[in-house]
Amino acid sequence: MNVLYVNHTGVVSGGEHSLLILLRSLPPVVTPLVACPGGRLATEVERIGLPTAPITGTAGSLRLHPLHTPRALAELSIAAAQVRRLARRHRADVVHANSIRSGIVLALARLGVPTVVHVRDCLPAGVLTSATMRLIAASATTIVANSDYTARSVRSAAPGAVPEVVYNPVDLEYWDPARISRADARARLSAELDAALEGRLLLGVVAQITPWKGQDTAIEALRLLVERGVDAHLLLIGSPKFVARATRYDNEGYVERLRAAIARADLEQRVSWLDEREDVLQLMRALDMLLLPSHEEPFGRTVIEAMALRVPVLATSVGGPSEILEDGVQGRLLPPVEPAAWAQAIREIAASPELAERMGSEGRRRVEALFTVQQHVEAMLSIYRASSSAEA
């Protein structure tokens, strides 16, 4: 089976991490080709030993703008022509779009072969969102959603759509707590930061820096904890990946607002900015708790990674995390933009090492049961076969 994978950006974020896991685990029956703009994604795919082909990317958001919208449509149209040529050259049996924008590319390309569109985001309600999802629903053979929450979002925008839900996977061999002890991970981090972290409550947010990821909630929760005498430290791991003018959020401006909030609260010595890192496993293993205070979260890849490492997770109650973890069992589900609730939950878990240990153990068991690479690969292969049969 020849499969052409299409991604609209060369930047590696959550959806691209999931794609890379799938590509690493494909059986020999699949012959892949990855079409994407130049950048880290292409480099990582080539590192696996798989072929890539360059296409035009777009940073345009799916909202109407007199300048950015026409430019984004032009970029998508160019990419569609490129993908059409690549599908013929690769003799693709299935074309798999790894994002909504890639799904638009496939709709514009009119390929005449089975297409699978992976929806990993929940777009804000609006005329353009509805039109986009209706276009994808009308043109795709199969829509795959990364959670029931995302699937409901798709159906809300395009009532005729019938998305298949396939959860993102976690590589349990890689995200294995036996690879490094928490004490060793904490010691390495202390040496790097030249900070005495021993005995401190270590919290972390692992996410791109953007308003909807809620780093401001984590900072305010930290302020409340310190105000109540909790000796806590926060790691902000990630960067403002999408900074083009066409991007929906002013992510660089958000970074400046976060830095100002940290300075006002006199937390400079309690917040570490660690940018993009290759050693996220070691950093996450050092944490006492992972925080994911997003305004909403279609899935939440860092949740299953932390759970695999036996790290208790506090995640937003809006979106996919409620399908991943059970409140009070593997961690906590908390309302977004309510830092007082986050601070209180952190204090309760920190006050009970037994509870934290139990949450960590339950988290590992949960991902072993529901989020394995084998389950993900088998589900995607089944969708490829069903899509091919549907178009036959």
Image: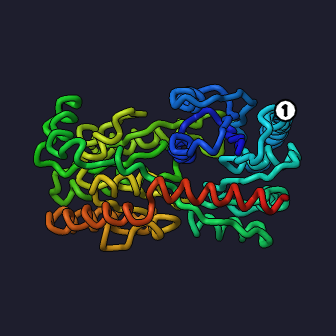
Q: Quadrant of residue 283?
A: top left
The amino acid type, in three-letter code, at marker 1 is Arg
Quadrant housing the N terminus: top right
Counting from the top left corner in percent of width and height, residue 74 is at: 85, 35
Residue toward you, 23 or 251? 23
Q: Is residue 206 above or below residue 188?
A: below
Quadrant housing the C terminus: bottom right
Which residue is labeled 1 in the image?
85
> Does 47 sit left or right of 98 as displayed?
left
Is there any visible trace of residue 67 in the rendered image? no
Counting from the top left corner in percent of width and height, residue 336 is at: 45, 64
Which residue lies at the image location 74% right of the left edge and 30% below the top edge? Answer: 55
Residue at the far left: name it. Answer: 199
Q: How many C-alpha atoms fall within 10 Å of the one at disc 1: few (<14), some, or many (≥20)?
A: some
Q: Is residue 71 above or below residue 339?
A: above
> Does 385 sit left or right of 292 as displayed?
right
Element on which disc 1 rests: helix
Residue toward you, 153 or 24? 24
Is there any visible trace of residue 242 in the rendered image? yes
